[in-house]
């Protein structure tokens, strides 16, 4: 336990518990006044998780615009204050600061360029960008005109990009010539060209980021800087209903293709802003640095929407934690006087391994809070963050949440007592519950599957293009409840500890990867007959990807083929999906009905190969395959 410390503007434990106890419709309708409404809502939540009456709506009859809330309403009071600080990949390149007024002009122009290309309210716009300010401008410009953005992480392959374009029927892509990360360039425009060969695209708007050479196709591709000169810097914000879609963000689940998680205007923006203030005691004008890419939900909620809705300054960093040296994060904190840094355990573990000198040679005196998100943080990394990075001065804010939840659900306020590895208590209106495999509710200090029994404003509203999939995926395992896919423990003190996914989702460096996706990529290769993918423990990434591959009869296992298959997956999905271990397996452990027993494959990948660990293998069609798998397992 780390004792609570006073923190300006932050709740202590009693304050949080009192707040949680006071949630009601009137509470929500009052809290949501933090947003600027064109028409104020008259209803708080209206929802049911029951099959016959399934619906989720928040802030009914409210009308607002997200970009007006993130920009316009701050203009009078803080038009000349910094809204976005951009720190480029190369520390010696010029950094930029944009005031709210400058962001306003840039977003209006971007919106007008989109309009001139025929984009209308409700259209889907795909954003495939590096971490540069134009990525945020493009998102806010979509919100301004009521277009629905779908940001695709710049590390995804042309194939993955094309799949996401097709799924949401987006005919326009906003990209850059290239991105830069860790001194390397990322050929974004070339990737878009390759995606255009698969998906049908009418327009590609290209931002000049590096000046690198790209080919432009007449009639399809336009340079942003040229188009921007021809449009006005004024664009009135479109009035949107609270339940109109704001964005789609693709995420991996345990089955099938990645799903387009859909968030709406009022509830999402409220939740991003409210949690940003509650968890980080954020005051207008403070510099907040969330290191996530805008390609992930963390970047949506805590790089763009939360901080800007709260009138803060947000830092966008193009690079990576260890370039040019493992001091980079802390140097950026010193250079810009960052007050809160919000990053992922995987980055902390990687930096921790490099030794304390890279940290201690920097000042970090501006830091007040340290945030973490994306995966369970091991107590050792938590302590290092708290003791070495924060010199014991800065509370660690461990926020548990998901793409589906919009923003944080279980997380401390800075003045609460903390425990290394625990996300502490739920936020107001969040009702976690533990159930066993049969759905029995578990009371007291215990572990189980983590469900949420009530709706909160930032909750996803649907899977794009598949009305049933939302209900089927999240509400059928335990009827009447949202099942998170995570396991958790509640301790005797009522604090929550998230233990990780209990489904077929792997969390690699804080990024979600569905085992089914990697398997489908592998079996597309001509030499592969069958593949099974599981997670394995990994010192830095948290989890790594372990693939078992059965080859076709005419193919021969070799190191070269192994490398080729790893490359193949990188090309099909992206580098984050590269298997860390790939074992050729003459057969996979299957039941007599043909179901692969992943439990056994997981144990082997974890190196737990005793008979006791592997458990009962007698129900397998061919128990001998297990011996072969154990004999040839790939050690870390
Ligand atoms: C925000 C985000 C969601 C999954 C989630 C869980 C894991 C996220 C965590 C955490 C333990 C935390 N996760 N934050 N586990 N402690 N503080 O990461 O969204 O990419 O959708 O991943 O990440 O397993 O279910 P997303």
Image (cartoon, grey):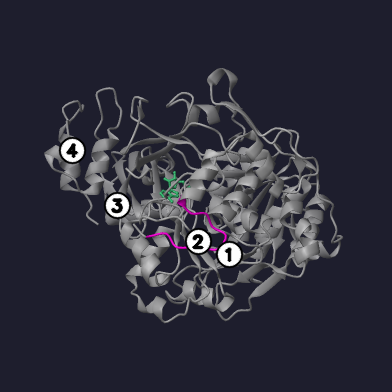
Q: From the viewer's perspective, is the residue at label 1 or at label 3 nearer?
A: 1
Whether residue 572 is situated above or below residue 336 in the rendered picture: above
Q: Which residue is mark 4?
A: 614
In the rendered structure, which disc, 3 or 4, sits on the residue that comes first in sequence? 3
Furthest-left residue in this view: 611
Q: Is mark 3 within 8 Å of ligand 1?
A: no
In the rendered structure, which disc, 1 or 3, sits on the residue that comes first in sequence? 1
Q: Which residue is mark 3?
A: 537
In the rendered structure, which disc, 2 or 3, sits on the residue that comes first in sequence? 2
Residue 551 screen position, x and y as percent: 30, 41
Image: magenta residue range: 3-13
Category of crowding for the residue at label 3, using alpha-carbon neighbours closer than 10 angstroms: few (below 14), some (14–19), many (at least 20): some
Whether residue 632 is situated above or below residue 323 in the rendered picture: above
Residue at 63% of width from left, 51% of height from top?
Answer: 273
Q: Which residue is mark 2?
A: 342
| Total numbered circles | 4
Cα distance between the residues tagged 1 and 3: 32 Å
In the rendered structure, which disc, 2 or 4, sits on the residue that comes first in sequence? 2
Q: Is residue 86 left or right of residue 424?
A: right
Residue at 60% of width from left, 53% of height from top?
Answer: 300
Cα distance between the residues tagged 2 and 4: 39 Å
């Amino acid at each position: 336990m780390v004792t609570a410390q006073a923190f300006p503007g932050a709740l202590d434990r009693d304050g949080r518990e009192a707040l949680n106890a006071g949630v009601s419709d009137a509470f929500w309708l009052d809290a949501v006044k933090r947003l600027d409404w064109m028409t104020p809502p008259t209803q708080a939540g209206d929802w049911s998780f029951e099959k016959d009456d399934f619906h989720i709506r928040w802030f009914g009859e409210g009308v607002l615009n997200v970009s007006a809330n993130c920009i316009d309403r701050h203009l009078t009071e803080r038009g000349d204050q910094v809204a976005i600080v951009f720190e480029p990949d190369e520390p010696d390149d010029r950094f930029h600061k944009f005031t709210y007024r400058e962001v306003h002009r840039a977003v209006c122009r971007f919106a007008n360029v989109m309009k001139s290309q025929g984009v209308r309210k409700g259209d889907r716009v795909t954003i495939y960008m590096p971490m540069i300010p134009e990525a945020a401008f493009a998102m806010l410009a979509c919100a301004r005109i009521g277009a629905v953005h779908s940001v695709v992480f710049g590390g995804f392959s042309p194939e993955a990009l094309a799949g996401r374009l097709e799924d949401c029927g987006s005919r326009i892509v906003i990209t850059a010539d290239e991105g830069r990360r860790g001194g390397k360039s990322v050929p974004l425009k070339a990737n878009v060209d390759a995606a255009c060969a698969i998906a049908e695209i009418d327009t590609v708007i290209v931002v000049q980021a590096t000046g690198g050479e790209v080919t432009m196709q007449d009639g399809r591709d336009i340079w942003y800087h040229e188009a921007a000169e021809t449009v006005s810097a004024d664009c009135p914000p479109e009035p949107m209903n609270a339940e109109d879609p704001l964005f789609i963000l693709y995420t991996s689940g345990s089955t099938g293709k990645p799903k387009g998680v859909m968030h709406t205007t009022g509830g999402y923006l409220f939740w991003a802003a409210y949690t940003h203030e509650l968890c980080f005691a954020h005051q207008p004008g403070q510099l907040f640095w969330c290191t996530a890419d805008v390609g992930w939900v963390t970047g949506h909620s805590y790089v763009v929407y939360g901080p800007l809705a709260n009138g803060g300054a947000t830092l966008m960093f193009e690079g990576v934690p260890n370039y040019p040296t493992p001091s980079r994060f802390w140097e950026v904190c010193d250079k810009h006087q960052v007050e809160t840094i919000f990053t992922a355990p995987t980055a902390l573990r990687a930096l921790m391994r490099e030794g304390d000198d890279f940290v201690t040679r920097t000042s970090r005196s501006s830091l007040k809070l340290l945030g973490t998100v994306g995966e369970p943080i091991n107590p050792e990394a938590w302590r290092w963050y708290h003791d070495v990075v924060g010199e014991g001065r800065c509370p660690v804010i461990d926020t548990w949440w998901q793409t589906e939840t919009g923003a944080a659900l279980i997380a401390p306020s800075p003045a609460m007592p903390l425990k290394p590895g625990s996300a502490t208590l739920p936020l107001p209106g969040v009702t976690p519950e533990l159930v066993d495999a049969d759905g029995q509710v578990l009371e007291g200090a215990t572990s189980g599957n983590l469900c949420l029994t009530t709706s909160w404003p930032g909750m996803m509203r649907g899977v794009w293009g598949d009305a049933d999939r939302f209900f089927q995926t999240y509400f059928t395992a335990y009827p009447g409840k949202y099942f998170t896919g995570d396991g958790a423990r509640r301790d005797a003190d009522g604090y929550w500890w998230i233990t990780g996914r209990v489904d077929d989702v792997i969390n690699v460096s804080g990024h979600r990867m569905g085992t089914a996706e990697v398997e489908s990529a592998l079996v597309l290769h001509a030499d592969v007959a069958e593949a099974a993918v599981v997670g394995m423990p990994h010192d830095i990434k948290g989890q790594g990807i372990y693939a078992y591959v059965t080859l076709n009869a005419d193919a021969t296992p070799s190191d070269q083929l192994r490398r080729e298959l790893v490359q193949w997956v990188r090309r099909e999905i992206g580098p984050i999906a590269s298997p860390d271990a790939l074992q050729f397996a003459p057969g996979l452990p299957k039941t007599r009905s043909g179901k692969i027993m992943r439990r056994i494959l997981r144990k082997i990948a974890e190196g737990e190969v005793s008979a006791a660990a592997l458990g009962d293998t007698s129900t397998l069609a061919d128990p001998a395959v297990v011996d072969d798998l154990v004999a040839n397992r790939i050690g870390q």
